[in-house]
Amino acid sequence: MTVNRLVNKFEYALFRHRALVIVAFLLATVFLLFKATSIKLDAAFTKNIPLQHQYMQTYLRHAQDFGGANNILISLCDESGDIFNANFFDTLRKAHDELLYTSGVDRVQVKSLFSPSTRFVEVVEDGFAGGPVIPADFIANSDGLAKVKENTEKAGIVGRMVADDYSCAMISAQLLEVDPDTGEKLDTIGFASTLEQNIRAKFQSDSISIHIIGFAKMVGDVADGAKGVLVFFAIAIAVTSVMVFFFCRSLMLTLLPIACSLIAVVWQMGLLSVMGFGIDPMSILVPFLVFAIGVSHGVQMINSTGKRVAAGMDAKTAAQASFRKLLVPGGVALLSDTVGFLTLLIIEIGVIRELAITASLGVAVIILTNLILLPVLMSFVRFSRGYKARVAAPSPGADKVWFALSAFATRKYAAIILLVTAVLFGFGYLQSQQLKIGDLHEGAPALHEDSRYNLDTKLITERYAISVDYLNVMVETLPSACTEHSIMARIDNFQWLMENVEGVQSAVSLASVSKSINAAFNEGNVKWRVLPRNTQSLVQASSRVETSTGLLNADCSVMPVILFLEDHKAETIERVVAAAKKYGAELGDEQTRFMLASGPAGVMAATNEAVSEAQQPMMWYVYGAVIILCLLSFRSLRATISVIVPLYVVSVLATALMTKLQIGLTVSTLPVIALGVGIGVDYGIYILSNMTQMLRDGAPLRQAYFEALKERGSAVLFTGITLAIGVSTWVFSALKFQVDMGILLTFMFIVNMLGAIVVLPALAAFLWRKN
Amino acid sequence: MGKKMICLVLLYTALSSGAVVGNTTQSQPEPAYIAAMAEKALLTDIINVAEQNLVAVGERGHILLSQDGVNWQQAEVPLQANLNSVYFLNKQQGWAVGHDASILATQDGGSSWQLQHYAPEQDKPLFDVYFTNSKDGVAVGAYGLFYRTEDGGVSWQREFHPELLSEDDQLYLEELQETDPELYQIELGAILPHFNRLYADGNVLYMVGEAGLAAKSSDNGRNWQRLDEFYNGSLFDITRTSAMTLLAVGLRGHAFQSTDQGASWQQLELDETATLNSVFSDQAGRLFIVGNAGSLLVSKDNAASFADLSRADGKAIVNGLVWREHLLLVTETGIKTIKLSELE
């Protein structure tokens, strides 16, 4: 009763000062719109990383010495299939220099044929000869190019800096999170577009093609694709508006919920901007989601008001009554959405946390715009006589349908429904256990397989012996460990064991390089490719390796073993990580620890683990929040069960769908389940809140359900279909993860709606036996 | 307390055995890993055992066996040192030598191997091994490392061959023996060149090595006669062609031919700069020279001319043999098989 009193008081205050309310909203909207216009797309490498994860702690500990996992590879390919021509070398040098002076690039780590650290060593009768692969006096004539080709082979960089078939050459670089000159955070998206303009546009020609991959480029491409979301937004607004109009047959009633939902989006963006957040390309769809949820609640409001006006109330009274009737169920629904989204905060990955904040903020704002502003605005609407007549006219057709549907609340049908649901659930549960963690496909999963980025990735992995999918196992040991045979031998053994793991393409470490250098010192005789036991000889071999190679730190107390993987599929990474842990434990001890992990695949390993660890708790928290809110608002266990069970079945089925469609559980798909729960709960709450009072009064269940359907059924059906149509357009998105999200959300909207209309009454039939 | 004591004792024996330069097996090495990639890793030698089996050896104590030259099984080996050479006396008896002065022996055609000699503290590799009968054998290696057995490898005695030194070095050593016995001992272990390869030509044993070393012995290596120097770089292999000439190959594309049992040598004009690791011939009289950077030279006219059939991948080829119409190469990336018909 206290809640009711509170609602009444609030209603009284609100509707007495309607003008004031509208002015306040107007002012806030203008201010936040202004703020919203300055919001930026914002992506950072570290946001995508579970920084608290053990692997990432290792990664961060050594990022200073070894650079990060945030690298960029630029491959220049000569269309003739042979890079040894003057034009190519001229272009390669210019591109190298261009990249060197691009801000955000760690200049020490820019490597190509033209970097001074690219050297060769050869054995001659009286000892050693060596020098830069491209000599200082290099002239790009046939002699000069032949010399470079020879040096390239001697330097052993074929497959790394030059393609296996000499058709391409590589420039690689690492990016700095913070620009040391300006102290500013790296603008990843800006950097990506600089690459496009200053490298690709400038150097691509008929004879030379340019292929760029790396996290920054991927994010840049995602951001470009994300801009296409505006089109989907426009389509969604148009589709929704048309549908709302057909639903209510009134221009004014169409405009109001659409406008209020757009205001919610503006507020959300404005507030994010005020709080200092940007919008990540990964959560670019959230504003759309907010709009959709807003419309769904708005439609309930206009439906309710419209029906009351038709029944003879004036606009103000009707709006006021609707407000009173819907504030609690709507508020509870939106609050559970908000709390549900907030639970994503437990996942220690920046982008997911931002998504949690972005989404929960947006949904919370809807409480204000669509449960408060909307009814106040509606109280001013003048309803035409025609409208009233249309709504008031008995609709025997619809009532017939509703009556037929209300049979779901009879025991006979309920039993069948529950049986089918149970079978579906069982099947779905089995499927959902097969859900794969991480990226299941090659290339960048956010992008389509035939996107330029993924084609570039494919080209580079095909033509070179290396890929961006590498994982560094950091060997943390004693200072000067590279002079200790026993430690180096263990690193060497570890590397060999790892090279034998399926999915590891090749590997390199200071140990393996030292062995080659030792052979080089012994006239290039491969029979000397061993780690000398003698300390002097070992020092001689290992000290020739510079720290810029990334194979050791200044006092060689840390030496990574770099494992190049065949791909970054979740199972590959899982297998490699498991083997690295096993062999690391066997070969390591107190002094010499084989620590996972750095490198892009190391980051993926950590992310996969974090995501998979977060999955269960997230579900518990989301459901916990929804259950508590349902209990509080319905004050009924039975009601709560009726709402939650269909919701859970749908969650499981959605997971099964992910397995079926080979959508892995990733940073971008993990939140979808939580979002789905948050959105799906609305239907059940609206239907059931209308029934509980009647049930308490002892009305027969079928009667109560029939009334609920008459009152809210059309709105529920309508919103389910409208939202599904809206999100289903995402399958045409340029971004693969939006396609995935689109499919999953469409499924969730439709099936949750069906759950609320079909399974909920069937459950009720058994829970309210007396009715 | 009891455990600690045992550890201390073990540690002590390990240290003490390391300190004694001996000729028997001392500290226990770790057995080789059985690894799928072994046939794709560095291999250094291959031998045809009685036309029935192939045995290849390589890094990390890898010994690979095959009956068809296609499928390879890795043998259990009680050691992880890189192996450099393998020799079989007959179908059953064989030896393999490698780093840490390791000598392995088999009595069952390569299925199982026993460690006969292991001296990691010397930090010197053995490069070749040869047995005249099941009792008498020699193993040679870096810095003039030389072992002999007269009991099939049950015991190995170290030998020092000052006759392979230049006259200057011999005088220097004699002087040192009197003036500075300590330095003399050190020099003994380092003054000789690397002995890279043995080649048995009837009763004559040839040996080539570092800095132009070429020598022959007619008493199974007890006494050596150094051939007149014809090259100052390292030689890695020597063989006799079907035209009865001797052919030696070495550093940076150098190859030399002798028609007078090694008394005089002529350099072959090869368009090759990579180091040549091995030279061998087949029953049909074809001559193969293999080397670093994928070098593969084939001659059908006893080294009068060579066809350059070098491999495009540029991987070092260490040795090879012809087996059932195929050329089998052991390389830094494992076994490579080429049909002889493809070389035409």
Image: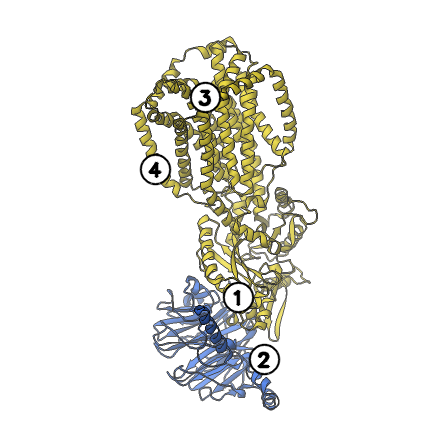
Chain colours: A yellow, B blue
The disc placed on residue A426 is 4
Give the quarter of the figure containing the C terminus of chain A. Answer: top left
| Residue found at the far left of this picture | A412
In this rendering, would A496 be left or right of A155? left
The disc placed on residue A715 is 3
Callout 4 amino acid? Gly
Q: Residues within 10 Å of mark 2 (few under 14, many from 20)?
A: few
Callout 2 amino acid? Asn
- Do discs 1 and 2 share a chain? no
Q: Are marks 3 and 2 in contact (CB under 8 Å)?
A: no
Residue depth check, mark 3 versus mark 2: number of the one nearer the observer = 3
Q: Residues within 10 Å of mark 1 (few under 14, many from 20)?
A: many
Would you place residue A487 above or below residue A248 in this image?
A: below
Q: Position of residue A146 (x, y in %)?
A: 61, 63
Callout 1 amino acid? Ile
Structural distance between the alpha carbons of marks 3 and 2 = 96 Å
In this rendering, would A139 be left or right of A584? right
Structural distance between the alpha carbons of marks 3 and 1 = 71 Å
- Do discs 2 and 4 share a chain? no
Q: Which residue is mark 1?
A: A487
